[in-house]
Amino acid sequence: MSDFPFAIIGFDLDGTLVDSSGDLTSSVNIALAELGRAPVSREQVLTFIGGGSPRMLRRALEATGGCPNTGFDALYDRMIDYYAAHIALETHAFPGVETALDTLAARGVTLAVVTNKPEHLADKLLRELGLRDRFACLIGGDSLGEGKRKPDRAPIDAMVERCGGGKAAFVGDSDFDTRAARNAGVPCVAVSFGFAHGPVAELGADAVIDRYADLIPVLERLS
Ligand SMILES: O=C(O)COP(=O)(O)O
Ligand SMILES: [Mg+2]
């Protein structure tokens, strides 16, 4: 029997477990180049991430002259094909992630990823980074059907069910994460080094961490 206060810890992916901003920026810019548009900066792309990849592309198009009435699907496919082929060129886990995951696993905690990224891309990225086997369950933005992505509670509920039930907490970097966790009645820790669009203190998380070394003591205090 584990002495850890949570049976399940779920993690958001982009901006929480990994800094994927470089490869996401390159992929958005491939799509913009198809339309002859100038590239956007990494800082701009950070403000587009969080609600899934179709939204990210739509926001990039709106910021560079407008979303075209036709051809969105082809552009989206181009962006995703490029991203899938270059998913871990610049992307890396944040410092301390592996140690924190090891410690939680050693304390008997079941680990999960709940992301708004399409499931097959999240799976590929975690495999390329050698992290996939650490997670008992992975739920993507398209895993549960239309509209059932964060901030909806559905992916958090599915995580708890697929991980065998029990007390859960969630770790994320954005408003989509804190809202999904709150909607599901699960405590949420926000990381301050992710892709949040505003001050992390305003995300409404139960706690904020500045580094992974603080995650476990913070979770112990939350319980
Ligand atoms: O795909 C996104 O927009 C964000 O992905 P995340 O949920 O892992 O942060
Ligand atoms: Mg995120």
Image (cartoon, rainbow, N blue to C red):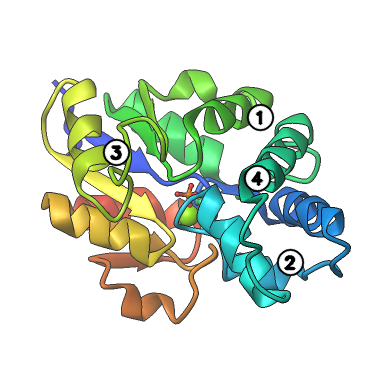
Three-letter amino acid code at the position of disc 1 = Leu
Q: Which mark is residue 42?
A: 2
Asked if disc 4 and disc 1 are in contact, CB closer than 8 Å, the reply is no
> Residue 127 falls in which quadrant of the image?
top right
Question: In front: mark 2 or mark 3?
Answer: 2
Query: In the image, residue 190 lies at what x, y percent?
Result: 37, 62
Three-letter amino acid code at the position of disc 2 = Arg
Q: Is residue 162 visible?
A: yes
Question: In front: mark 2 or mark 4?
Answer: 4
Three-letter amino acid code at the position of disc 3 = Ile
What residue is pinned by disc 3?
9
> Residue 82 falls in which quadrant of the image?
top right
Badge 4 or badge 3: first in the primary sequence: 3
Residue 25 in the figure: left or right of residue 97: right
What residue is pinned by disc 1?
129
Disc 2 versus disc 3: distance between alpha carbons? 29 Å
Q: Is residue 223 visible?
A: no
Q: Residue at x 80, y 52 (%)?
A: 26
Q: Residues within 10 Å of mark 3 (few under 14, many from 20)?
A: many
Badge 2 or badge 1: first in the primary sequence: 2
Disc 2 versus disc 1: distance between alpha carbons? 21 Å
Q: Is residue 124 above or below residue 194?
A: above
Q: Residue at x 61, y 61 (%)?
A: 69
What residue is pinned by disc 4?
76
Badge 2 or badge 4: first in the primary sequence: 2
